[in-house]
Image (tube, rainbow, N blue to C red):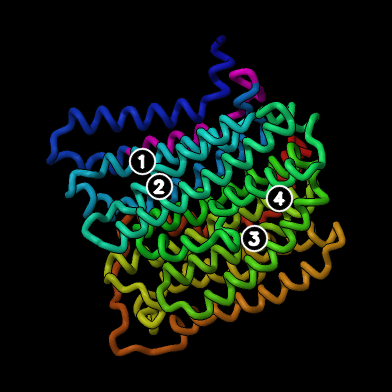
């Protein structure tokens, strides 16, 4: 292959080079200098993220197994931004705890291996590449969920994630085999031409959808979510909540809008039902939570239900709204998770009651959390309002007015439990309030990036217009 052909894999090659370099560092750098791996990773991945915004050609590799275009490339950049914020928010935790256990390099290699799998998954041109990417992205996460080896809940999270992933993987593979049996190919381009409406194809589509539904945490495939988020390190919970979920939504959107577009009369009913149940169950269970990680876990389940409003349309508008909402969701959720991680690292407190009086002792953290929760709730003028507005517009454009009404009801429910946290921070008092402390540089940078993203996306509408233009790649 010529050099131009290899450049289609620029992001994958760059990330793999970083992982290999970290492996060399692990072998040759002495133990007392291992803490230097943290700033090294931040710098290298920052360069990788910036390079991702350079123009790149479109094309296919390996006989159509791998493909890339402007929208896929842009979405990888979104994932890079999210992972970079996760790295900033986790940097001090890794430096102060994980490096001392001589496992800092392993943490980053596993994280980048998972991201590499997501790259291949969203660039898949056939089901084999999709499945390889899915497994490569999931298996390292099971190890990362159990990374805090001294905590039983962390080990439990890792076990639950790997067992649930194995079940979902088996269901997806069975669905793929049925689609292969009816179409005679695993290549997306061939399936589009030969897919037919019969019982075996419908069953294969349902099973495949169920497997991806696990990764997105759609009801009823959500049972692992709260327990894993609670037991896993907060940095990994935030990665699962936004990066892993966002990539799964993106590849599902591609497959529904292109490969399975002839089956739309069937899958739109499935998406409709799942959207309603996911929104209601996620929001209603979030009302009962006291632990912030479980609270945000059920919140993320509800947000997945809102995303389905864009998926149900099958149009360019739906593509643009889903990608835009994922971008907004990454900044919003990482703002909330960042504050939770900061407070947990400093005080060990993770319950909503512990946040009472936080504004009086740590006003800046309270404001970041408020912005993140307001964006998740869809309060104007922050970015989350426009994200949900565009999703509702997309669903309404196809005549799903009842679904939009039910979504508005769920926005009201969500606003109530988000306000419970805000009330605790701003209106409640606590004699044992979290004392004032100053975040370290990496955490401050991570939180500042989330605030800028929430505010900028809320007032800078050309970002959505740009995504809308890119979305012609799949419509």
Other-residue count near label 4 (Cα within 10 Å), few / some / many at <14 / 14–19 / ≥20: some
Picture mark count: 4
Q: Secondary structure at mark 4?
A: helix
Other-residue count near label 3 (Cα within 10 Å), few / some / many at <14 / 14–19 / ≥20: many
Q: According to the image, label 1 marks what residue?
A: 110
Q: According to the image, label 4 marks what residue?
A: 464
Q: Secondary structure at mark 3?
A: helix
Closer to the camera: disc 3 or disc 1? 1
In this rendering, the answer to whether 367 lies above or below 207 is below
- Identify the residue shown where x is 45% and y is 37%: 136
Left or right of residue 446, residue 382 in this image: right
Q: According to the image, label 2 marks what residue?
A: 141
Relative depth, front residue between 255 and 424: 255
Sooner in the amino-acid sequence: mark 2 or mark 3: 2
Is 97 one of the magenta-colored residues?
Answer: no
- Identify the residue shown where x is 24% and y is 31%: 25
Sooner in the amino-acid sequence: mark 1 or mark 4: 1
- Identify the residue shown where x is 42% and y is 67%: 293
Other-residue count near label 1 (Cα within 10 Å), few / some / many at <14 / 14–19 / ≥20: many
Relative depth, front residue between 127 and 53: 127
Q: Position of residue 411 (x, y in %)?
A: 66, 73
Closer to the camera: disc 2 or disc 3? 2
């Amino acid at each position: 292959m010529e050099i131009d052909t290899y450049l289609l894999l620029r992001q994958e090659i760059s990330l793999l080079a970083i992982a290999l370099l970290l492996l060399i560092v692990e072998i040759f750098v002495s133990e007392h200098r291992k803490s230097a791996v943290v700033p090294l990773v931040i710098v290298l991945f920052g360069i990788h993220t910036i390079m991702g915004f350079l123009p790149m050609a479109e094309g296919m590799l390996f006989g159509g197994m791998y493909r890339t275009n402007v929208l896929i490339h842009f979405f990888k950049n979104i994932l890079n931004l999210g992972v970079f914020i996760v790295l900033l928010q986790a940097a001090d935790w890794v430096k102060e705890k994980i490096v001392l256990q001589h496992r800092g390099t392993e943490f980053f290699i596993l994280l980048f291996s998972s991201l590499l799998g997501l790259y291949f998954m969203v660039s898949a041109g056939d089901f084999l590449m999709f499945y390889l990417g899915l497994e490569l992205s999931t298996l390292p996460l099971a190890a990362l969920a159990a990374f805090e080896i001294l905590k039983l809940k962390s080990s439990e999270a890792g076990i639950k994630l790997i067992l649930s992933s194995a079940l979902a993987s088996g269901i997806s593979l069975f669905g793929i085999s049925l689609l292969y049996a009816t179409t005679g190919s695993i290549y997306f381009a061939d399936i589009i031409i030969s897919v037919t409406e019969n019982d075996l194809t419908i069953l294969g589509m349902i099973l495949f959808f169920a497997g991806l539904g696990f990764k997105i945490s759609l009801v009823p495939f959500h049972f692992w979510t709260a327990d894993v988020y609670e037991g896993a390190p907060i940095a990994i919970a935030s990665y699962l909540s936004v990066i892993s979920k966002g990539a799964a939504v993106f590849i599902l959107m591609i497959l529904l809008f292109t490969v399975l577009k002839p089956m739309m009369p069937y899958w739109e009913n499935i998406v409709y039902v799942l959207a309603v149940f996911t929104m209601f169950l996620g929001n209603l269970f979030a009302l009962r939570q006291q632990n912030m990680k479980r609270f945000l876990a059920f919140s993320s389940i509800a947000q997945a239900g809102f995303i389905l409003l864009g998926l149900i349309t099958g149009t360019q508008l739906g593509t643009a709204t889903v990608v835009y909402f994922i971008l907004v969701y990454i900044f919003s959720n990482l703002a909330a998770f960042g504050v939770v991680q900061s407070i947990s690292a400093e005080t060990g407190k993770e319950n909503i009651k512990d946040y009472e009086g936080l504004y009086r002792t740590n006003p800046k953290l309270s404001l970041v959390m408020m912005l993140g929760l307001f964006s998740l709730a869809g309060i104007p003028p922050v970015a989350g309002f426009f994200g949900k507005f565009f999703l509702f517009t997309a669903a309404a454009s196809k005549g799903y007015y009842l679904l939009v009404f039910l979504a508005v009801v769920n926005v009201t429910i969500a606003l109530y439990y988000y306000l419970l946290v805000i009330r605790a921070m701003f209106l409640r008092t606590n004699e044992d309030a979290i004392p004032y402390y100053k975040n370290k540089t990496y955490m401050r940078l991570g939180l500042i990036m989330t605030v800028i993203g929430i505010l900028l996306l809320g007032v800078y509408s050309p970002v959505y217009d740009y995504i809308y233009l890119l979305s012609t790649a799949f419509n």
